[in-house]
Amino acid sequence: MKLYDSATNKLYEVINKQVSIYNCGPTVYNDIHIGNARPLITFDVLYRYLETLNYQVTYIHNITDIDDKIINKAKSLSKTEKEIATIYYQNYVDIMRELNIKPMTLPKVSENMQAIIDYINKLVQGGWAYVKEGDVYFDVSKSTNYGFVSHQNIDALLAGVRKQVNPKKNNPLDFTLWKQTEVGLNWKTPWSTGRPGWHTECAVLINKYVGDHVTIHGGGIDLKFPHHENENAQNQALFKRNIADIWMHVGHIDINNEKMSKSVGNFVLVKDLLKKYSGGDIRWFIYQSKYQNPLNFSEELLEKSSETKLKLYQQINAAFIQMALNDYQPLTTKAILPNDFVTAMNEDLDLPNAITAIWKYTKGLNKLIRNKDYATLSANVNNLIKTLEILGLTYWNPSTDPVISSLISEWKNALQQKNYSLADSYRQKLMDMRIISG
């Protein structure tokens, strides 16, 4: 499998069968919107597909439960930080379940504080960081390849800084590793009482749960700079290597052709979408564009996508029903993924072409039904269901439902009695239930 590295702008083949993935998770101070769900779903598909290819995958997805935003939310609701973090963490877990996200390791920042303090201390002792009045900053001037991840030029960045916002910093680009504060949750350290900076938290969790680097580091494109750049700088300092072999950055989701922004209320929460649509509907919508590209969202587009997914399921339903009408027991053979699907997935997780491959394969079901080739039909349906599993889509065979099974039996009896008008009425009932299409 080949993946596009956004740091070098090159495709790399994932050769080593031991793969680690780190995907930046949420700060749990509110519910996630559709834009937050895109990286979550994208890396879930990657996780599933790599395991299908027999890779041994370690997948880490952090939970930031210490942050100024959590403090502010707690104050506004007259709750503690822990209460707010717990509420929104559980909401996130619930949404992941609704989206059928495969379980991964979910470390919380608050539960890894000693590792964070030890990590920062190593940077200070090594001369890569300095202490100013209780705060600790990373010295960007000491970095050997700052700008590698985001293709930023240090001189250009400095030229864009009109004034040094924080006079404690030696350099405007230096970033906070530890913040002195007694507001909110805090910890005592050799430097001060306070809490860690965001950029260090992710670097530490990679180091603790994986090692000195990960195979694949991902997240939204908005994290590329400064967050991922700053993670990489710290790792270079301590381990003399980049923190990731491959960087995967997922594109924005626009809302009605405008950039999504919480500040202007231009966003849609996933929990609200799930009141009307299934997690599978949302996933299917996400697959309509390559993961690096921007994706425009509107409820009309989601509705159309949902209808398209339903038609795919109806085709598979029709295959199972035809087998039932003809007394053919579906086989449980080992699934073989369609060649075009594999080709698309192997080329940098090309989800739109993977969907095209699924449709191409699905169209062949009708010919098999007409030819009454139920053995091949059964095998191909099994293959299709496997592709859906890789995409995190759960298929349910409607012929196993007692009500639908009864309708199929009545349909079958009518056909045996050559009462085609009655048979058509049962077929129509299944169409009205949207189990099959016309």
Image (cartoon, grey):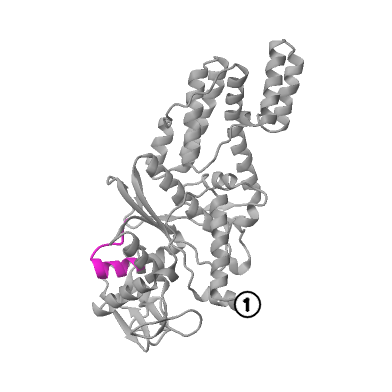
Judge whether residue 21 can be spotted in this image.
yes
In the rendered image, which residue does mark 1 sit on? 76
The quadrant of the picture occupied by the C terminus is top right
| Residue 132 quadrant | bottom left
Does residue 10 show up? no
Residue 185, image x, y percentages: 48, 79
Q: In percent of the image, x 54 and y 19: which residue is there?
A: 367
Q: Residue at x 56, y 22 (%)?
A: 366
Q: Is residue 185 above or below residue 217?
A: below
Membership of 237 in magenta stretch: yes
Left-right relation of 84 to 418: left
Question: Dot 1: few (<14), some (14–19), or many (≥20) neighbours within 10 Å?
Answer: few
The image position of residue 288, as x and y in percent, is: 53, 44
* Magenta stretch in the rendered image: 231-246
Q: Nearer the viewer, residue 407 or 347?
A: 407
The mark tally for this picture is 1
Q: Secondary structure at mark 1?
A: helix
Q: Residue 423, percent across and down?
A: 73, 18
Q: Position of residue 300 (x, y in %)?
A: 66, 47
